Amino acid sequence: MKDGNEMGTAEEDTPEILIVVPCLNEAAHIGGLLGQFTPATERIGAKIVVADGGSTDGTQRIVEEKAAQDARVVLLANPKRIQSAAVNLAVERHGEGCDYLIRIDAHGAYPDDYCDRLVEEAVRTGADSVVVAMATKGFGFFQRAVAAAQNSRLGNGGSPHRHGASDGAWTDHGHHALMRVAAFRSVGGYDETFTHNEDAELDYRLRQAGFRIWLTGKTIMTYYPRASVSGLFRQYVGYGRGRARNMLKHGMVPKVRQMLPLMVFPVVAGTSLAFLHWSAIVPASLWALICLGYGALMAIAQRNPDGMLAGFSAMVMHLAWSLGFWQQLLSSRKPERAGR
């Protein structure tokens, strides 16, 4: 970009943008998403690459139809299936000459000017990465309860990228939105051995390399959480395992807001010792009472009946995250077998 005092053509002053949409079986959302972002490609001169992990629900056909209508839309096969590999492959194949990468998650909702605001913030602040706050929204009763939990401190621990920053702020992590392609390539992109927490792992390497991350208050994305207990539990087991791998890889110390849920699985497992003494159930009981009580207070304060189930949803997230973390931690400590 040129300095404001320099003369240059609009073409010279316009950064090249690559929008990447990792997806797998998103037929219900991908058409609307591409329809929404197509005007943005014209406004900011972007290309949209949909990196599909082998969808079997018609997602690929929908993207192919869009690509036939608009040369800026490209379908890219992602044989490794996971999101980290999808973005890496898209940058490798289509990132040459691009200034910024914008990552769009197919299972979410975005303002129509989302890409415009991200590029403006990157140019204004000089940030190497612009991240956004993430609001969660549900439709069915359980999904709305999960959303209520994830939008509260009980469910997110006060994470900055869950609450946002109205005026913007420099941060160490946030929901990935825009990155300078040169910075992304400089640190090697996403670690493809991570199926979860790959964003936080990359943010750590970006900061270590001296790159700066800006949490914008100019735009936000909306995420739709899992709509079943089993789906939510599996997701958070993966999050816990990913966080543990991240900490082990970089020698990181858990933050206070991570230490508290980290202890949930041990105290729940500790209830098995209740046959020795009744006090073994006290820690787990206090945790359950706090979660359920918090949910009840939310329901009353917000006049939102979904809050009554938000406490239970938070318990599912805490237990699954803690279980995943300890599973990963303990499995990494196992000694190698002889002959391996």
Image (cartoon, grey):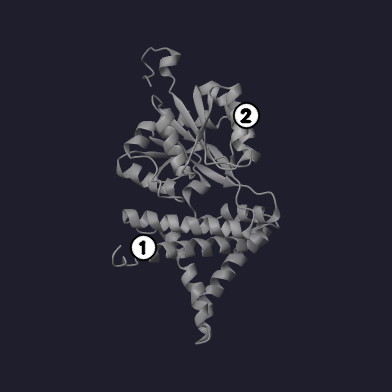
The image shows residue 48, relative to residue 307, as above or below, that is above
Q: In which quarter of the image is the C terminus?
A: bottom left
Q: Are marks 2 and 1 in contact (CB under 8 Å)?
A: no
Mark 2: few/some/many CA within 10 Å (<14, 14-19, 20+): few
Give, as a three-letter code, the residue at label 2.
Gly
Mark 2 residue element: helix
Residue that appears at 43% across and 23% down: 15
Depth check, front residue: 290 or 263: 263
| Left or right: residue 188 compared with residue 238 | left
**Closest to the observer, 188 or 144:** 188
Task: Please identify the residue farthest to the bottom as the structure is shown.
Answer: 276
Q: Which disc number belongs to residue 260? A: none
Q: Can residue 130 be seen in this view?
A: no
Could you tell me which secondary element the residue under label 1 belongs to? helix
Could you tell me which quadrant the N terminus lies in?
A: top left
- Please give the label number shown on residue 35: 2
Crowdedness near tag 1: few (<14), some (14–19) or many (≥20) residues, C-alpha within 10 Å = few
- Which residue type does callout 1 highlight? Ser
**Residue appearing at x 56%, y 40% in the figure:** 221
Who's the residue at 50% across and 82% down the image? 273
- Between residue 190 and residue 71, name the one nearer to us: 71
Does residue 176 lie above or below 282 as drawn?
Answer: above
User: Which residue carries the number 1 mark?
Assistant: 332
Q: In this view, does 5 lie to the left or right of 18?
A: left
Residues at marks 2 and 1, CA–CA distance in whole angstroms: 44 Å
The part of the image, by quadrant, that contains residue 230 is bottom right
Q: Which of marks 2 and 1 is nearer the N terminus?
A: 2
Mark 2 vs mark 1: give the one in front: 1
| Residue 44 picture location, percent across and down | 50, 23
- Residue at the spot x=50%, y=87% of the render? 276
**x and y percentages locating residue 49 in the rendered image:** 51, 31
Residue 302: x percent and y percent? Answer: 67, 54
